[in-house]
Each structure stands twice: as structure tokens, then as C-alpha cells.
Amino acid sequence: MKRFTDRLAQLRGVKCEGVDAEEYEEPSSEPIFAVGTLIRFSDGTRLRGQFWRLTKAGGPLVSIFDHRRRYGMPAPVDALHIIHDELAGKQVLDASMDETTGDLRFQFEGEVGLEVFNFTAFEIWELRFPDGTGELSNYALRK
């Protein structure tokens, strides 16, 4: 695990090239929209995750759970647009993993933070480095 956390820390100084999302509707009586988010870094690292939250200037900004919610506003929240606008082109100042939960934490310039959550024992996030090495969220918790 130390090798993975060391590699994660090497993302310091790397920029976010962009954020892509795959959104699809799950069949049910009430449609549920599922989203997979891909974050691309300038060194070739790729992060895929389902559950995330952005913070800015020390407070919550938006999370994937806000996506498509109206909250009494005229238009629904477009969390995917917000995460793209907040991260694209910004440099990583710090990257780490919580060894208890397997959550990933990134700090970007402009006081923007990204937390990628690991809620289950299943593969909920995947981080791949340019050399093909990486880790899946469920394996990240193995000591």
C-alpha cells in the first residue's frame, strides 16, 4: 500500500486536464441517473470514480449527489459542469488516501478540494498511473 500512497503523492504539481462523465439512466419505475466520472491529469494518470464532493475555500461547493437536483431553483444543478469548470487546468497541490476508509483526497490550486469516496467493499473508484500501475478502491483498504 505504501507504494500506492507514494505514487499518489507524486501527483503534486500535475494539472487536471479535464473531467469527463458518463451518465446513464438505470431502468426502474423511477429512473435513477448513474454517473461515472473520469478525471484526466496532465501526466497521463486517470481517475474514475462514482461518488465525490468538491469543496472551495473550506466549505462545500457541490457533490455528485446534487447532480440533477432542483432544490427549489429554476434549473437543476449541473454538478458535472461545475466539477469540470473547477478542476480543468488546475494544479494538484496535494493528493492522499485515507487508510481507514479508502477515500481519496486532492487539493487543487484556488482552494478547491476533491474527495472521492469509497462507500462499499466494491470497486467504486479506480486510479491508473501512466505506467499502467494503479489501484481499485476495494484493494486499497487491504493492509
Image (cartoon, rainbow, N blue to C red):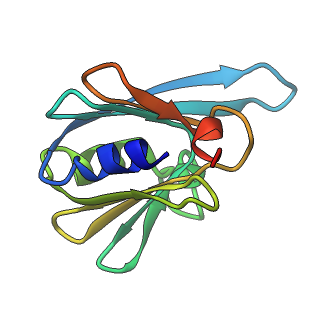
Count of number-bearing discs: 0
How far across and how far down the image is residue 134, in percent?
42, 30
Camera-side residue of 32 and 107: 107
Residue, far right: 29
How far across and how far down the image is residue 130, in percent?
25, 24
- Is residue 13 shown left or right of residue 84? left
- Is residue 51 shown left or right of residue 15? right
- Is residue 139 shown left or right of residue 40? right
Is residue 95 in view from this perspective? yes
How far across and how far down the image is residue 56, in percent?
32, 71
Residue, far bottom: 58
How far across and how far down the image is residue 17, in percent?
17, 36
Is residue 78 in view from this perspective? no
- x 57%, y 46%: residue: 51
- x 54%, y 55%: residue: 103
- x 59%, y 64%: residue: 72
Check the image and report above or below for 32 versus 59.
above
- Is residue 45 shown left or right of residue 124? left
Check the image and report above or below for 123 versus 16.
above
Check the image and report above or below for 22 versus 19.
above
Camera-side residue of 135 and 49: 135
**Quadrant hosting residue 128:** top left
**Quadrant hosting residue 101:** bottom right
Camera-side residue of 41 and 140: 140
- x 62%, y 36%: residue: 139
